[in-house]
Amino acid sequence: MQLKDLFCISTLGIFLSSCGFYSLAGSIPPHIKTLTIPLISNETAEFGLAEDITDGILQRFNEEGILQLTDGDHADSILRGTVKKVSEGPYTYSKTESVSEYRYKIDVAIEWYDIQQEKSLLKGNYSGWGAYGLSGDIGSDGIDNDGDGKIDAEDDDEFGEPRTFAAQVAVRKIAEDILNDIMTTW
């Protein structure tokens, strides 16, 4: 083996091993270790939506584990939000020009605030949507309701009332986008 080959192999090894230690959580300000997420407020007429979105965000943060969730008295930061708008309407049409899918969309305004330094770390508007049909059974409606590329029997998590499932998909997308922005803002 030539010296040039050894250099390339060792450089590649150093590069690959250093990538193993990279963490998106490292982009969060170092003094922020905890987060509180109070109930999101709701400016819409959709009953229970604020609770669903708050629970979805809490669940996503618990899964990722980048910040310790705590009550407001002991938190370094707070994530506040408001459901601004819910809309739904035709999404796809059949060959006979009747609606075959509806799109359920949620718009939320979020602010991540640094309690210690009294400043906003992130402000943004987020939206998520889910599709649903009129069949009443999303397990056999021929629609990829959660956007994962699987339909009906192929997709083991497609079950329940169509509109409710579309709302859950929208909440999951919003929570994912918020988490991604928090991890990559800094």
Image: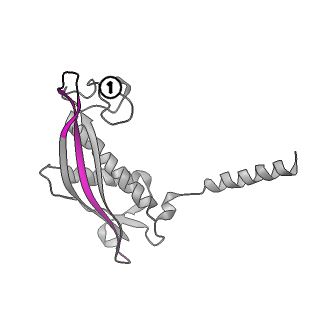
Front residue of 182/90: it is 90
Q: Residue furthest top?
A: 96
Name the residue tied to disc 1: 152
In this rendering, the answer to whether 164 lies above or below 74 is above
Lateral position of residue 88 relative to residue 142, left or right? left
Pinpoint residue 16: horizontal percent, then vertical percent.
Answer: 66, 51
In this rendering, the answer to whether 148 lies above or below 35 is above
Lateral position of residue 76 relative to residue 39, left or right? right
In this rendering, the answer to whether 90 lies above or below 47 is above
Lateral position of residue 167 relative to residue 20, left or right? left
In this rendering, the answer to whether 131 lies above or below 45 is above
Q: Residue furthest left?
A: 45
The magenta stretch is 89-116
Residue sitting at x 82%, y 48% = 5
Neighbours of disc 1 within 10 Å: few (<14), some (14-19), many (20+): some
Residue sitting at x 23%, y 45% = 105
Lateral position of residue 55 relative to residue 89, left or right? right
- Which quadrant of the rendered structure holds the N terminus? top right
Q: How is the image coloured?
A: one colour
Which image quadrant is residue 153 in? top left
Pinpoint residue 101: horizontal percent, then vertical percent.
Answer: 23, 31
Front residue of 3/176: it is 3
The kind of residue on which mark 1 rests is Asp
Query: Is residue 175 magenta-colored?
Result: no
Pinpoint residue 58: horizontal percent, then vertical percent.
Answer: 33, 55
Residue sitting at x 18%, y 42% = 88
Q: Main secondary structure of the magenta part?
A: strand
Residue sitting at x 32%, y 46% = 172
